[in-house]
Image (cartoon, rainbow, N blue to C red):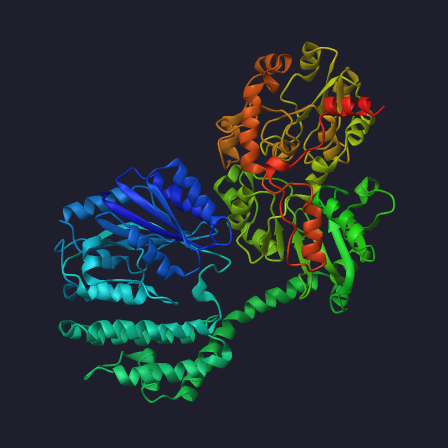
Amino acid sequence: MPRLTLIVPAYNVQGYIGECLDSVLRQDFTDFEVIGVDDCSPDGSGATLDTYAERDPRVHVLHLTENVGLGRARNAGLDRASGDYVLFLDSDDTLAPGSLAAIAARLEATDDPDVLIYDYTRTYWDGRLLRNKRAELLDESGPAVFRLEDRPQLLDLLQIVWNKAYRRDFVTRLGLRFPPGYYEDAPWTYSSLVSAERIAVLDRSCVMYRQRREGGNILRTVSRKHFDVFDQYDRVFAFLDERPELDVWRPALFRKMVDHFLTVLEKPGRLPRDARGEFFHRAAKDYRSRLPEGFVRPAGGRGYKYALLGVDSYSAFVGVTRANNVRNRARLGSRARIGRAKRAALGVFYRSQLRMPLDENLAVFSAYWGRGYSCNPAAIEAELGRLAPGMRRVWAVRSEHRDRVPKGVETVVVGSREYWSVMARAKYLTNNVNFGDTVVKREGQVHLQTHHGTPLKTMGLDQAQYPASTNMDMEKLLSRCDRWDYSLSSNRFSTTVWERVYPCRYTTLETGYPRNDVLLNATAADVVAARHDLGLADGSTAFLYMPTHREYEKSFAPRLDLPRLAEELGPDVTLLVRGHYFYKPTDRLAELQASGRIIDVSAHGNVERLYLAADALVTDYSSAMFDYANLDRPIVIYADDWDTYRVVRGTYFDLMAEPPGAVATGQAQLTALLGSDAWRDEKAAGLRAAFRERYCDYDDGNAAERVVRRVFLGEETLLPVVPLAERTPAPSPAEALREQAEHA
C-alpha cells in the first residue's frame, strides 16, 4: 500500500500532461502511485498517460469510454486509489520539487490528520510567479492539529481540492464524492473541512497552478452551465441538513455561497448577457431561503449587494455595476489611445483596404520571412492550385528574393502597395512563420500557421528560460500568434509542444507536413533526376551535411574540416553542404566547392530534392532529421558541441540518448563512421526505426490534400492517416538506379 495516491484527470491537455507527470515522477519522495484518468480525451492525452505507465510501474491509467467531466473522472480515480492519503492534481499544473517529501513529513509530524492543507503558486506564461494571496492562513505556529472552529478563516482559501491531502479512510467514512457540473470542488471542500476532526497545515507552496493564457479554465467560458453553482450549494446545505451537529457552520457557508454567486455575476466572460437577470433572481431566492437567523451582512459595497439580493432588486444591482464600469472604462481609455496610435501607423492606404470586402477567392502565401517559395506553404499552394484552380494565389516575398519564386507564380513585394492590398483583402493567409506585427487580423480572415520543423530545440515561451538564445518580446510573440486560426502538426510530439509554448485559441490540425509529401510520393525517376541535377555520378555516395543555426555564431562556419573529410572518404563520396538560411552566403563555402568533391547547396531552392538525392543525412540538431526520417534512409548525428548547445538553447529531449542513427562527437570518429558501414548498419537501422515510431506519425504523403480540404474547402472529415508500417517512401538512390535499369 503506497503512502500517497495522486489522481490526475486528463482532458485536452496533451501540451501539458507530460510536464505534469514529470514533476511528480521526479520527486525525491517515491512512496506513491499515480492514477491517470483519461476522460475520453479526443487529443493525445490518453496516449501520453499510457506511455508514462509503460515506463514507470507507479503510474496506472483508466480510460473512460465517455467524457464524464472533471468531478466524475476524479471519482473513477478515487475508486482505484490504494494509498493512505489521496491527493488531486490537475493535469496542466505541476508539483514543485520536494513537495511530496514535505507533505509526507508533515503528515508524519502531525500524526496522520484527516486533512492536510498546503499552499500553491500561480505561474504565468510570461514567467511571473504569484504565491497565494492568503498564504498567511497556513502559518504553522500554534497547535499542529486542530478543528476548523479553531481556525475558521481557512474557509477563505480558494475552494479547491488540489491543495490538500485527504486521509483515504476519512473520505470513505464520510462518503465524499464529486458531483457533476461546474464548481464541483465546492461541496467536497466545504463538506470535508467542516467534518474533519483533525486538520493540519503546511506552509509550503507545493502546487504550481498554471494560469493558461488562452483561457484553458472552463470556468472562464461564457455558458449557462454556470447555473450549476446553485446545484452545488444545494448539495452543501443538504450535507448540513443530514448532520445537525454541523449547524454552527450555516452562517459561514451562507456567506461563502453568496460571495460565490456574486463572483459568477460580476466576473466577465461567464454568464451570457441574456441570462444575468435570471441568475440574479435565482441567487436572490436562495439568499432568502437560506438566510440564517441573526446573520450580519458584511460592511461596505459588498454588504450593499447582499442587501440587493435580499430584496431581489436586479435593477439596482445593474445600476451599481454600471457605475463601476464607468470607472473601469476611464482606466482603459489610455490603452485604447495606444491601440489607435498603432492602427494609425499602418498607413492610410492599408486602413482603406481593411474597410473593403474580403476576397473569398484570394489566398496569400509566404515562407521564411519572405525569402522565397518553399516549405509547407509552397506544397499547400500547389495542392490548392490542383483542387481549387479558380482561387487566386499570391506569394509575398521580399524584393531581393523575387528570383527564387518559380515562373508563373504571382508575387507581391513585402511592404509595397500591392502587398498591403492583398494582406487586407485576402480570405486566407498562410505562412510558416509569423507575419509582421503591423498585419491586422480581420474578422472572417483565416490564418494558417504551418510551422517549419519538429522542435528539438526550445521554442516560443520556453525560450524565455534560455535568455542567451533570444531577445524576443514574448508578449508581442503571443500577440502575433493570437492571429492563428490553424496550427499544423507533423507528429504528436510537436502538437504537445506547440499547444504549450504558443498558448492561443487556434485549432491544431494533425495532418503531417505538406512539404514532406514528396518524400513519400516521389518515384525512382524523381530520385535519379534530383541526383543528375546536382551532377552526382551514378553509384556514388552523397552525404547531405546540414548543420543548424547557433545563436552564439554570427556566420556559418563549418564545424568540420570538409576538404579533409572529403579526401579521406575517397573519390566515390560527395559532400552536399547546406548552411542554415539565417546565414548569408560566404566566400568560405565557395572555396570549399572549388576544392573538389564538395557541392555548396545552401542556395538550393528545394531542400526536399536534396533529401531525395542524398544517400544519408549528416546533421547536428537540425529539424531536418525529423523530415529526412520519412525516407527511412540513414541519419548520422555529428554532435561535437551538444553540451554547449543544450545549455545555451535548451532542448526537449536528449538526442544522445535517443538519436535517429549513429552518433559522432569528433571529426576522426565521424570519418571512421562514414568510411565504414557503421552509418548504415543494423544498429543504426534499429535506432532509426525507433525514431520513426516516435516522430513520423502523420507524414504519409497526403498532408497537403488534408490541409487544403479542411482549411480552404471547409471539409470536416480528414483523409485517414496511412499507418507507418504501410507507407512506402521514395526509393533510395541505389534502389532507384536498379529500378530504372530493370525498366530500361
In front: 590, or 720?
720
Residue that appears at 84% across and 42% down: 406
Q: Position of residue 161 (x, y in %)?
A: 30, 59
Drawn side of residue 534 relative to residue 662, left or right: right
Q: Residue at x 33, y 66 (%)?
A: 179
Residue 516 x/y as whole percent: 69, 39
Q: In the rendered view, would you say 731 is above or below 537? A: below
Quarter of the figure that contains the N terminus? top left
Residue 93 location (% of width, % of height): 39, 51
Depth check, front residue: 414 or 449: 449
- Residue 737 lies left or right of residue 291; in this view the side is right
Query: Quadrant where the C terminus lies?
Result: top right
Whether residue 298 is situated above or below residue 605 in the rendered picture? below
User: How many numbered marks appear?
Assistant: 0
- In the rendered image, residue 481, in percent from the top left (x then y), is placed at 60, 54
- What residue sits 84% from the left and 40% below the top? 403
Q: Is residue 644 left or right of residue 288?
A: right
Residue 131 position (above or below residue 597):
below
